[in-house]
Amino acid sequence: MTAFLRDTPGTPASKVAKVCVIAVLVLAYSGVCVLALTGTTANWATVWSYRATFWNGWLATMGISLAALAGSLLIGGLAALARRSDFLPLRYSAIAYIESVRGLPLVVLVLFGFYGVANAIGWHDRVAVGILVLSLFSGAYIAEMIRAGIDSVGRSQWDSADAIGLSPWQTYCYVVLPQVARQILPPLAGQFSSLIKDSSLLYIIGIHELTFAASQVNSATYSTFESFVPLGVCYLFLTLPISLWSKHLESRLRYET
Amino acid sequence: MKIELANVSRSFGCHRVLNNVTATLEFPHTLAWIGPSGGGKSTLLRLLASLDVPDSGEIRCNGQVLPREAEARRLQRTRVGIVFQAFNLFPHLSALENTILPLQHVHGVPRAESLERAAAILRRFQLESHSHKKPAALSGGQRQRVAIARSLVTSPDLLLMDEPTSALDPEMTAEVLDVVAELRQSGAPIVLVTHEMGFARRSADLVAFVAGGGIGESGPAETFFEFPQTDICRRFLGRVLKY
């Protein structure tokens, strides 16, 4: 029996075994949930009437994440180039930015960025500040991805580009960036998934995104479980496909090189 | 073709790879550089290719002094073809796209004409059935032939090859050397760094021995291998021709 349930490189488990295990696990975990929750009064109807709140929160989360993705790609790309610059002040500034951001928790950045900096200079657009903070946060990670991508393009490629007479700009355009893009697409997809999850922290500065929406519904209906289950489902609905897509990209990249 | 070196020196860190090299090399078509590893052959070739500049001294090709300034060197490189030991091709582009790239983006040839010229040169090297494959799908010999095609598609004044067969097995080596030998009939002069003594002897007009940071001796292929002048060259040939 245990042999049937084991999956090792030498003797992989059969498809039947995998399907059976998944079916039994789903039943078992559902059973546990049902047992734990019988006796509590579910309040799905009330929460359902708040679906517009969820929907708006979901849209806001999507919008903020997409805007922050664009922003962090721009910031990350520039920081990666600055990090490789031969002009020392530029290089050290990039290192200072990347290392300090990567060394700080996002909550600290959000609180400091909004209450510490934005308020001090009289900038009260929460959403814009939130997007900027997220972009700066994620940009530092993307900068390191792009830098690793550029480093992975071998010396011989730069030599070959020189040899056929490409200018430095053309070398980046036609030789380096296409290879970097393929290299970093899988981790970039992962980073986008992180951005979506991290955007939930913007709730602490009062941005009306998905997590904020769920906690609003919770305080209006006093039904914590019914408010937070849809919240989790909404996030998974966004992050699972991206995670699968990222895995698919990784396997394709391995196959091609 | 006439290459003149005047007091050329090049160091990397504290290691002096070329030490005051002065020489005049004149040959009708093919010049082969042979010599031990670390003797300065590749460094000399990179200087000739304008990929690198000497610390001091100057190099003339057919009377023209090679430039030192970056943009002038890039322009100079557009007029020579360069083939390295391996990894010449861009892995994300097909053989055809690799060949089109310098034509279209460096020489400003319109896309349609670039395509035509690239296809023609790949056909000449019997590569047309592979033109849409990425380098990863080609054999080592095919990759080097595509690299040679790419370096020739722009009709360079001079073709430089740095050990083009060192990373290949004997069969692929023969396949690539056949192409190089065929270039004698038509095309630009060739300077090549090689460990293939048989090839240097049969196909080169002039052979130069590069060792210890300078050009030890040079001569027409026949006499060079029959009657080496210096002890160091005799010893080198004795060792490499032993097996």
Image (cartoon, coloured by chain):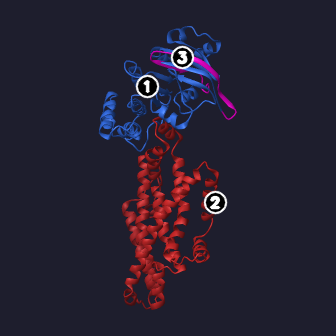
Point out the tag, 1 or 3, that comes first from the N-terminus: 3
In the image, the chain rendered in red is A
Tell me: residue B128, above or below residue A132.
above
CB atoms of marks 1 and 3 within 8 Å: no
Q: Which mark is residue B25?
A: 3
Main secondary structure found in the magenta portion? strand
Kindly identify which residue carries mark 2: A96
Q: Which residues are magenta?
A: B12-39
Do marks 3 and 2 both belong to one polypeptide chain? no
Q: Cα distance, mark 1 to mark 2?
A: 48 Å
Do marks 1 and 3 both belong to one polypeptide chain? yes
Q: Secondary structure beneath disc 1?
A: loop
Residue B98 seen:
yes
* Amino acid found under the numbered disc labelled 2: Ala
Q: Secondary structure beneath disc 2?
A: helix
Do marks 1 and 2 both belong to one polypeptide chain? no
Where is residue B162 drawn, in percent x and y?
Answer: 51, 28
* Amino acid found under the numbered disc labelled 1: Asp
Where is residue A190 drawn, in percent x and y?
Answer: 47, 62
Q: Which mark is residue B157?
A: 1
Label 1: few (<14), some (14–19) or many (≥20) C-alpha neighbours in 10 Å: some
* Amino acid found under the numbered disc labelled 3: Leu
Q: Specify whether B225 is left or right of B100.
A: right
